[in-house]
Amino acid sequence: MLRQLVADPAKMNATPGLRQSLMESFIIHARSLKHFFYPNKRRHVLDVLAEHFVSDWAARRPPCTITDDQVDRMHREIAHLSAARFDLKPGEPQWQYGKVLDGLNPAIDLFFESVD
C-alpha cells in the first residue's frame, strides 16, 4: 500500500475526504512498520516485531533514517488525539510520502530477504 501510493501520487488528487483517508492510512502504516523494524524502549509484550522472524535482526537491520521529529509528528498529528493538532497552520509542510517510504524501504527489503 505504501509503495503503491508513492508510485502513483495522482491517487492523492482524490476528493478531500479520500485524500485525508489515504494520508492517515499511509502514516499509520508507516508508523507501525517503523516500530516493527525499529522498536522503541516502550515495547508491549504483545508487540509483533521483525526480530521475532529474523533471529539476528537487530544486528543486521539497516540504520533507521526516519527522524524522531517525523515519528513525533506521526504521533501528534495522526495517531493520538492531541491538542497539538490545533497548532497546525495553513501552509505547513505536507507529508513527504516518498521520504517516509525511503526511510522504511531498506528495512522492508532486508526483512523479506531474511525472514526465517
Image (spheres, rainbow, N blue to C red):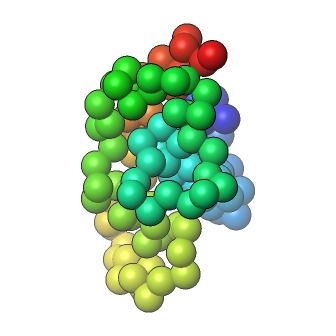
Q: Nearer the viewer, residue 15 or 75?
A: 75
Residue 53 appears at what percent x and percent y? 61, 27
Above or below, 57 against 69 in this view is above
Residue 110 appears at what percent x and percent y? 48, 17
Above or below, 96 against 15 in this view is above
Q: Nearer the viewer, residue 64 or 47?
A: 47
Residue positioned 34% across, 25% down in the render: 59
Q: Quadrant of residue 33?
A: top right
**In this orientation, does residue 8 appear?**
no
Query: Which quadrant of the figure contains the N terminus?
Result: top right
Q: Is residue 36 left or right of residue 93?
A: right
**In this orientation, does residue 77 appear?**
yes
Residue positioned 44% across, 48% down in the render: 39
Above or below, 84 against 104 in this view is below
Residue positioned 45% across, 26% down in the render: 57
Residue positioned 63% across, 16% down in the render: 116
Q: Nearer the viewer, residue 66 or 21?
A: 66
Residue 23 appears at what percent x and percent y? 58, 54
Task: Give the number of callouts.
Answer: 0
